[in-house]
Amino acid sequence: MTSDSHALTTTEHSPVAGLAHDASGGISNPILGMLLFITSEVMFFAGLFAAYFASRAAVAPWPPAEFEHTLEPFSLVFPATVMLVISSVTCQIGVNAIRRDDRAGFVRAIGLTLILGIVFLLIQVYDYGLLYSEGLTVAAGPYGTTYYTLTGFHGAHVFGGVIMLAVILYRGMAGQFSSRHHDAVEATSIYWHFVDVVWIGLYTTLYWLR
């Protein structure tokens, strides 16, 4: 076997070969796949926002009188929002670290991002409990239905992002990423930034515009 054929065989069977950047300067398959997925998710959330505003236009008053002071912008959800925004920053710090082959910095930043994502979910679950105790349930008319539909689907996406972060953190600790092989990290960061942007839209719509 020649050195060229051996190199080709090694590349084909390497567990990280598919994560390398496109040598031609084009976009790699993992990142392209993530961008296409996010495009579909943008349309999905656009439909949910459209349903919310349609319900809001059809129901008066909005919010209903009994829930006028339920969704306060500076309630428990405010620190959760701050943490999610910070997690987007730490995620990008991790991406920048692995681009420089700083694996220790990558692990620290992604580990912190993972913790912030988990705390966000825990706060959301706790906040759901508080809202239920105040009577805001899924069955509380269009107001309750649209609120839990929007935040619930977003929470599911955050959960998916947490799993993705956990996977790349594990692989990063195993030394599977480098400055040349980290497209899975890039794809995960794109998804996490998307989740962050969607939440900012939800927080503004549900808690500020009301």
Image: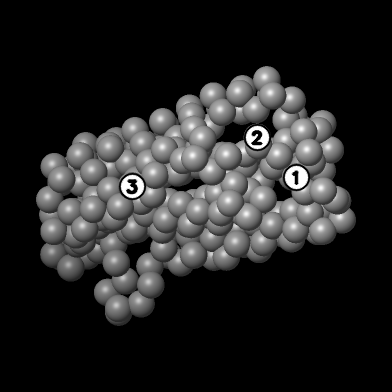
Side of 198 where 7 appears, left or right: left
The reply to whether dot 1 and dot 3 touch (C-beta < 8 Å) is no
Q: Secondary structure at mark 1?
A: loop
The reply to whether dot 1 and dot 2 touch (C-beta < 8 Å) is yes
Q: Give the class, few, some or many, for how many residues have Cα within 10 Å of label 3's Cα (few <14, many ≥20).
A: some
What kind of residue is marked 1?
Pro
**Residue 200 point in image, percent of width and height:** 50, 53
Q: Is residue 204 above or below residue 105?
A: below
Kindly identify which numbered label has been placed on residue 16: none
Q: Nearer the viewer, residue 151 or 65?
A: 65
Query: Gap in Å between the C-alphas at discs 1 and 3?
Result: 30 Å
Kindly identify which numbered label has been placed on residue 86: 3
Q: Give the class, few, some or many, for how many residues have Cα within 10 Å of label 1's Cα (few <14, many ≥20).
A: some
Which residue has dot 2 on it? 70
Tell me which label, 1 or 3, sits earlier in the chain.
1
What kind of residue is marked 2?
Thr
